[in-house]
Image (cartoon, rainbow, N blue to C red):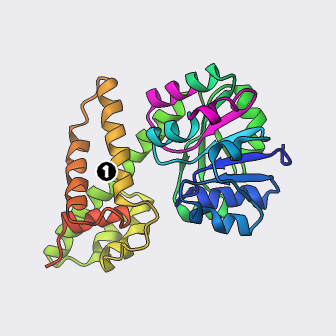
Amino acid sequence: MDTIPIAWLGTGLMGKPMAGRLLQAGYPLSVYNRTPSKAESLRQTGARLALSAAEAVQDVDGVVLMLADARAIHDVLFKRDVLVLLSGRTVIQMGTIGPQESLRIRDRVQQAGGEYLEAPVLGSVTPAVSGNLIVMVGGSQDQFDRWHPLLSCFGPDPVFVGPVGQAAALKLALNQMIASLVAAFSLSLGMVLHHDVSVEAFMQVLRKSTLYAQTFEQKLPRLLERDFKKANFPLRLLLKDVRLCLETAHRSGLDPAALRGVEDLIKTGLKKGIGELDYVSMYNVIHPQK
């Protein structure tokens, strides 16, 4: 499996280091990005830089998608010159999209004669570089077994979730917690600081409680310093994921009222022009600088 040729479509913030992991593992890699300069560093480390998605997909066995959303997938993968090349190839979708979107993409890939599985990842740029992402796989057990060596390049223990759609749903369930936990922690930290409570006392109590989450410790320095310029996950992309969560919750008969409040906070952040900053910049909305 480690010698089969792979096409990689999408070399953005997460796509570039993940594609780099395949190069390090010895996979022959053709990469395509709609902005070619974003894939240049991969060319320098051994990837073949394709000028079109169709060129990337020729003569490969697998096609990995790390694109921004379902619309981008349709725009890139389902052009006529690409669609006719999917027969006999496996498409692995690794971005964050809704379960219904994933099922529709699967159906179209299968109609073209290809196979499809979803493998969204949990984690940011740092674990993408080191190969410590959490990989969640939706498809068949046979597909999971066949593609396990490749998926293990991104994380040491890929998790088989179930049929297509289930891994996408799990990824959204986790991503809404990313937004909700940071919003909740930002509010608590703001209250503590406003009332001159020691941050160390606050964290000491929090660490001993069942309320504690590891992300609080990780994000605290950036919140205190309001250091959001180096974006591991831009706020504008979190808004996309939150909206997918809201749509999926409605389809499931759930009441996502709490998440709608987080959505409003993020939209305010985008209006303030901080959409390209790291998502924890929503702290500036919740606790504005004096």
> Left of 167 or right of it: where is 247?
left
Quadrant of residue 16 within the rendered picture: bottom right
At label 1, the amino acid type is: Ser
Q: Specify start and end residues of the magenta stretch as a single range.
A: 79-106
- The percent position of residue 233, horizontal first and vertical second, equals 43, 60
Residue at horizontal 32 percent and vertical 32 percent from the top = 247
What residue did someone put label 1 on? Answer: 180
Crowdedness near tag 1: few (<14), some (14–19) or many (≥20) residues, C-alpha within 10 Å = some
- The percent position of residue 245, horizontal first and vertical second, equals 35, 38
Q: Is residue 210 visible?
A: no
Q: Is residue 57 above or below residue 280?
A: above
> Left of 121 or right of it: where is 231?
left
Residue at horizontal 58 percent and vertical 37 percent from the top = 77
Labels in figure, total: 1
Quadrant occupied by the C terminus: bottom left
Q: Residue furthest top?
A: 111
**Viewer-closest of 193 and 73:** 73
Quadrant of residue 90 within the rendered picture: top right
Q: Is residue 234 visible?
A: yes
Quadrant occupied by the N terminus: top right
Would residue 85 be counted in the magenta stretch?
A: yes
SS class, disc 1: helix
**Viewer-closest of 118 and 287:** 118
- The percent position of residue 82, horizontal first and vertical second, equals 64, 36
> Left of 267 or right of it: where is 206?
right
- The percent position of residue 132, horizontal first and vertical second, equals 63, 57
Would residue 163 be counted in the magenta stretch?
A: no
Residue at horizontal 73 percent and vertical 39 percent from the top = 62
Q: Is residue 214 above or below residue 159?
A: below
